[in-house]
Amino acid sequence: MVSLFSVVLTFIAIILIPGLFISRRLSVPFSIRNILRFIKLAASQNDDEEERNEKRGTMGEKEKRGGLPKHVAIILDGNRRWAQKQGLGTSDGHKAGARRVIENAKDCFAMGINTVSLFAFSTENWARPEDEVNGLMSLFEENFRSELPFFQRDKIKISVIGNRTKIPQSLLGLIKETEEATKSYEGKHLILAIDYSGKFDILQACKSLAQKAKNGLIQVEDIDESVIDKELMTNCCEFPNPDLLIRTSGEQRISNFFLWQSAYTELYFPNVLWPDFGEAEYLQALTWYQQRQRRFGRRV
């Protein structure tokens, strides 16, 4: 008797009451068929709502990515001071800085940055002690060898800009090999400035245009800013002018780096030495950049 009573209550709770509700809601006769129709309709509406939410979420992500700079340039400053603070040798500071390069490159590209340019070795750096310079050249070679599989796996295009006349042949060979192996990749571009000078970049662009004008390939009156842009070393990338330039260590100058390209660039000077400039510091830089864009009504 108890079992039969339970069955009746279950029928009322699961079938009869919902069925009557559905019948009244849809203004249709009470039947199993109409109940199934309602369930199918509700499921369809739920799927549509989930799709709309997914699209809103996707748009939100696109807007978020849209607020990021397309090209970030970084002056890697502070390796020697970092080593001194840690009680280490200069070479240890440069090794720590090299490790940070790879870690930050991974973070940048994971966040959707298209182009990252690193001022790794300036023309003025040749004046440093010979053993330090030789150590840096060896460190460049070591990293080109060890990181090429990573560049290929993550499809990161590598370009090296600067005056190549003083670079050791062994390093120059590795540079050419890496550039050749990654030249077809798109969407992630890592530019390393080695023996680079902003003045030299502008000078070589002017010489190139002067030679073209001498040979009748271009008229002087046709030379404008866009023509000069194409002659600069950064013409190797899709976004040649950086949106954000970061110089670590707190020094507020760009030290002969991207002098032409940085005319309209946001400049950020965190008081952090390069080996300590991690993901948190990078996120702070991006947040600062986005706030600047919103504050002054620029592109975000």
Image (tube, rainbow, N blue to C red):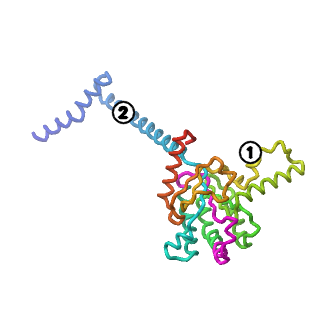
> Residue at horizontal 55%, vertical 56%?
269
Quadrant of the snapshot with the C terminus: top right
The residue at the point 22 percent across, 30 percent down is: 17
Residue 58, percent from left and from top: 49, 42
Quadrant of the image for the N terminus? Answer: top left
In the image, the segment drawn in magenta is 109-137
Residue denoted by label 1:
226
Where residue 259 sits, quadrant-wise, is bottom right
Query: Is residue 276 shown above or below 205?
Result: below
Instruction: Give the residue displayed 37% in from the left and 33% down from the top.
Output: 40
- Mark 1 neighbour density, 10 Å: few (under 14) some (14–19) many (20 or more): few
Q: Marks 1/2: CA distance?
A: 58 Å
Mark toward the viewer: 1 or 2: 1
**Kind of residue indicated by mark 1:** Ser
- Whether residue 114 appears in magenta in the rendering, the answer is yes
Q: Quadrant of residue 120?
A: bottom right
Q: Is residue 269 magenta?
A: no
Secondary element at image label 1: helix
Residue 42 - label = 2
* Residue 4 in picture, x, y percent from top left: 14, 38
Q: Position of residue 10 (x, y in %)?
A: 19, 37
Left or right position of 33 against 59: left
Whether the residues at callouts 1 and 2 have beta carbons within 8 Å, the answer is: no
Q: Toward the viewer: 60 or 50?
A: 60
Residue 45 sits in quarter: top left
Mark 1 or mark 2, which has the lower sequence index? 2
Q: Secondary structure at mark 2?
A: helix
* Residue 7 image offset from top left, x and y in percent: 17, 38
Q: Inspect the image, locate mark 2, and give the three-letter code of the amino acid beneath it.
A: Ala
